């Protein structure tokens, strides 16, 4: 699948995408888990956790993180490793826990430092501020942190696993 997508990219962008294939895969996983995170966050925030946006965000990020581990391990970083699986998973979830703080900090600053919440601002302003701070700024900051930390600590060794799954 990746090869067919890469083949469809025009030159010279194709060479850049091939060179940074791992980053492209990480971005695809990130985009997919962003959709999961966003859907869960908006659902929880508009229903059972309407008065607790931080709790809704933490739950949505945790669900997306579980999906992210599976996809990153088996696809984005499938040839990287260097750790026992239980150690790798523990590091992944610890780093992702720190990532939750990174993801959530812009939303907390927006709501509780800048007071971008009802009654200080309109409901529309609050919702836009929540989306921008939680789903755009927080996600970008969290993804940058996780890209660096996963490659450095969780999947440190290149070519540690075979490219073709063994039966």
Image: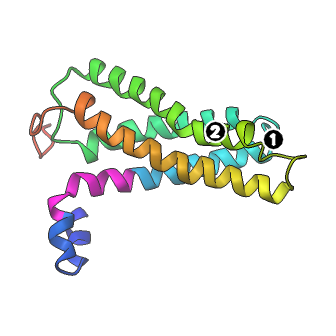
Dividing the picture into quadrants, the one containing residue 136 is: bottom right
Q: In the rendered view, would you say 15 is above or below 67?
A: below
Query: SS class of the residue under badge 1?
Result: loop
Please identify the quadrant where the C terminus is shown. top left
- Where is residue 67 shown, x and y percent of the image? 44, 40
Q: In the rendered view, would you say 128 is above or below 58?
A: below
Looking at the magenta stretch, what is its main secondary structure? helix
Q: Nearer the viewer, residue 12 or 8?
A: 12
Q: In the rendered view, would you say 118 is above or below 150?
A: below
Q: How many marks?
A: 2
Dividing the picture into quadrants, the one containing residue 109 is: top right
Q: Which residue is at a point 17% across and 37% down the rendered structure image?
A: 80
The mark that comes first in sequence, 1 or 2, is: 1
Query: SS class of the residue under badge 2?
Result: helix
Q: In the rendered view, would you say 28 is above or below 147?
A: below
Q: Nearer the viewer, residue 35 or 99?
A: 99
Is residue 127 left or right of 149 when viewed as pictured? right
Residue indicated by mark 1? 50
Dividing the picture into quadrants, the one containing residue 66 is: top left
Give the magenta-colored segment's residue range: 18-29
- Where is residue 43 shown, x and y percent of the image? 71, 48
Q: Nearer the viewer, residue 52 or 109?
A: 109
Label 1 and label 2: CA atoms lie apart by: 11 Å
Is residue 25 left or right of 21 when viewed as pictured? right
- Where is residue 5 shown, x and y percent of the image? 26, 70
Residue sticking out furthest to the right:
119
């Amino acid at each position: 699948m990746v090869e067919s997508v890469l083949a469809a990219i025009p030159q010279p962008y194709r060479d850049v995408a091939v060179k940074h294939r791992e980053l492209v895969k990480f971005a695809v996983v990130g985009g997919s888990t962003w959709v999961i995170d966003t859907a869960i966050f908006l659902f929880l925030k508009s229903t059972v956790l309407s008065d607790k946006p931080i709790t809704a965000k933490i739950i949505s990020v945790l669900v997306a993180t579980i999906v992210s581990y599976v996809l990153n391990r088996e696809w984005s970083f499938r040839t990287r490793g260097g750790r026992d699986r239980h150690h790798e998973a523990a590091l992944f979830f610890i780093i992702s826990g720190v990532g939750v703080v990174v993801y959530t900090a812009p939303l907390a600053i927006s709501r509780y430092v800048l007071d971008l919440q009802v009654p200080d601002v309109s409901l529309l302003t609050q919702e836009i501020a929540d989306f921008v701070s939680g789903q755009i700024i927080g996600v970008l900051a969290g993804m940058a942190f996780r890209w660096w930390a996963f490659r450095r600590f969780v999947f440190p060794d290149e070519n540690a696993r075979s490219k073709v799954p063994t039966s």
